[in-house]
Image (cartoon, rainbow, N blue to C red):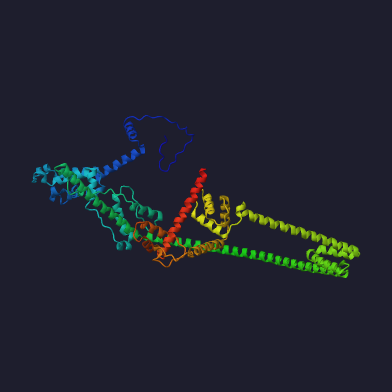
Amino acid sequence: MLKEALEGQLSVVYNAVAASVQVQVEPVGRWFEAFLKRRIRNVSASFQELEEEEELSEEEEDEELQLEEYPMLKTLDPKDWKNQDHYAVLGLAHIRYKATQKQIKAAHKAMVLKHHPDKRKAAGEQIVEGDNDYFTCITKAIEILSDPVKRRAFDSVDPTFDNAVPSKAEGKENFFEVFAPVFERNARWSVKKHSPSLGNMEASFEDVDNFYSFWYNFDSWREFSYLDEEEKEKAECRDERRWIEKQNRASRAQRKKEEMNRIRTLVDTAYNCDPRIKKFKEEEKARKESEKKAKAEAKKREQEEKERARQAEEEAARMVREKEEEAARQAAQQAKKEKEAQKKAIKKERQKLRTTCKTQNYFADNEADSVRMMEEVEKLCDRLELTSLQTLNEALASGNKEQSKAALEKQVQEVNVQMQKEKEAELQAQQAARSAEHASGGGGVNNRGWNEEDLQLLIKAVNLFPAGTNARWEVIANYMNQHSSSGVKRTAKDVINKAKTLQKLDPHQKDEINRKAFEKFKKEHSAVPPTVDNAVPSERFDAVSESNSAPWTTEEQKLLEQALKTYPVNTPERWEKISEAVPGRSKKDCMKRYKELVEMIKAKKAAQEQVSAKNKK
C-alpha cells in the first residue's frame, strides 16, 4: 500500500502494478456479527453504515436536547389529562411531533428525576396523596407519546396546529407567500412521504399538474379517536360497549369528513387563485386559437385548391365539349351537304330517267302500255337508289331502243319481285302476331266467346273465392259453369289463363268492366217484375219506400255484420234496429244485402262441395 503523499508532494510508480487477485475473506469477531445482521435483514453494508450514522446523529441530538420547562405543569389537573399538551408536559413543546422516541424517553427521564414525588418529598415539598398529584400528568404524557398508535391519535388533534384555510382575497395578493406555508404544514398528514412543493411562478406545467394531482388525491392518516367522548373500557356490559363504539365511529367519520372537506376547500381555493393556472389556460386558449386558425387557413387553402382544380377541370371539359360540338356541327353540316348533294343527284337522275322514257314514248306501242310504263317508271324513281338510277340511265343512254327497253323492263321486273317479297313477309308477320295473340288468350276451344257477362262473373268468382281456398280454380270454374248464361263450359285451365290476361289489362279497362258489372247489377235489381194482378207488397217492405242503390262499402259491411250478431233472430223489430246501426242504409237495403250474402255463401258452398265430390271420385 502506498504511503499518503504530503502536501506539495507527488506519488510516482516506477514499476508495473500487479494484477488484482480475488480472495475469499471470512469475517470474524464484530465484523462477523455485522455481516450476520446484514444477511438476516437482507440489507447491504452501505445501508447499515447509513443506519449507524443516523443512530450516531440521534445520539448527538439526544446529547444536545434542551428541554423547555412548562410553567403551568404544577397547576395541571390529572383528571383533565385529555386536554393537556403532552409535549409541553415533557418539555418538548419546541419540537413536538418531530421528537424521536429516544428524545421522548430522555425527556421523561429528566422530568422524573426532577418532579418525582419521592424527590420532592425528600426536598421538603408537600405531596398530594394518590393520583391527584401533577406527576400523574407526566406519567400520562409518556404513556401517550411512547405508544405509536396513541401518539398518532394525539398528533392528529395537535392543539397547536393551525387548521385555517386562506381566503381568495388573501391568496390573490401574495399567492405563494400565503399558500406555501399552509400546504407545507398540512403535508404532515400525508400517508405518502415527500409531498411536492408549491413551487414558484417559473414552474412547468408538469410540476404544477403533479402538485394539484397529489393534493386532489390526498390520502391523510389523520384520525380523531383521541376526541372520543366515551371510553368503551368503562362500559359495564357488552351491549353498552358496542353502543359506545358505534357512537365513537360515527363521530370519527363526521370529523374525518370535515377534515377532507377542509383539505378540498384549501386545494380548490389555491387552484382558483393560482396565477400559473390562469397563465396555462391563456396559453392553452391561445394555442387552440392558433391551431383553429391554422386549420381554418389550411381548409381554406384546400378549398381554394379544390375550387381552382374544379374550375380547371370545368374549363378543360368545356373546351373538349366545345371541340366535340364543333366537330359534330361540322360533321352535321357535311352530312347535310352530302345529303343535299345526294338528293340533288337523285332528283337529277330521276328527271333524266323520266325525260329519257318520255322521249322514247315509254318504249310502248299504244296508249295503254304507255300509261302502264309511266306508272312503272314512277315506281322505279321511288324505289331505286342513286347508284341503281345512274346505272339504269347509263344503260338507256348507251344502247339502242330495244336494248334500252329490255334494260328498263328487267329493272321493273326486279323491283316488282322485291315488292312482292316484302308484301309476303308483312302478311306472314301479321299472321304470326294474330297467332301469338290467340295463344296468349288461352288454349282450347272454350277460350272463344268471353263476353262481358262471363268476365264480370269471373271477377266476382275470383273475389268470392280468395287465395287459400281448397281447389280454388276448380271451384271458380264450377261456379261459372253453374251461373253462366252463355252455355260454354269452362275448365280450371281456361279460367286461370283468362285471369292472367285480366291481370295484364290496363287499370282503366278493369274499372270499365267493374262499372259495367255494377250497372247491370243495378238494372237487374231496380227493375220491377210484371205481375198478373196488383199484388200487395210484403209486410217486410211496407215501412220503407226508398232504398239506397249505391254499392256497399267495407265499413258498412262491417257494421251490418256486427248488427246481425248484436240482434239475433228472436229480437223484436230486428231489422229496424239493424238499419239504425248502419247509417245511410234503410231496412230494405239491409234485408237485400243479407239475402245476397246468403245466396253467395250457398253458391260458394255448393261449388266447393261439387269439387270435393269430384276429387273423391
Residue at 42 percent of width and 43 percent of height: 8
Q: Is residue 108 left or right of residue 616?
A: left
- Residue 360 in percent (x, y) is at 88, 68
Residue 112 against residue 578 in the figure, above or below: above
Q: Is residue 276 left or right of residue 86?
A: right
- Residue 352 in percent (x, y) is at 84, 69
> Residue 176 or 350: which is nearer the viewer?
350
Count of numbered tags: 0
Quarter of the image with the N terminus in it: top left
- Residue 371 in percent (x, y) is at 83, 68
Residue at 24 percent of width and 53 percent of height: 161
Residue 286 against residue 128 in the figure, above or below: below
Residue 138 against residue 389 in the figure, above or below: above
Q: Quadrant of residue 277?
A: bottom left
Q: Quadrant of residue 448?
A: bottom right
Residue at 31 percent of width and 41 percent of height: 53
Asked whether residue 410 is in view, the answer is yes
- Residue 460 in percent (x, y) is at 51, 57
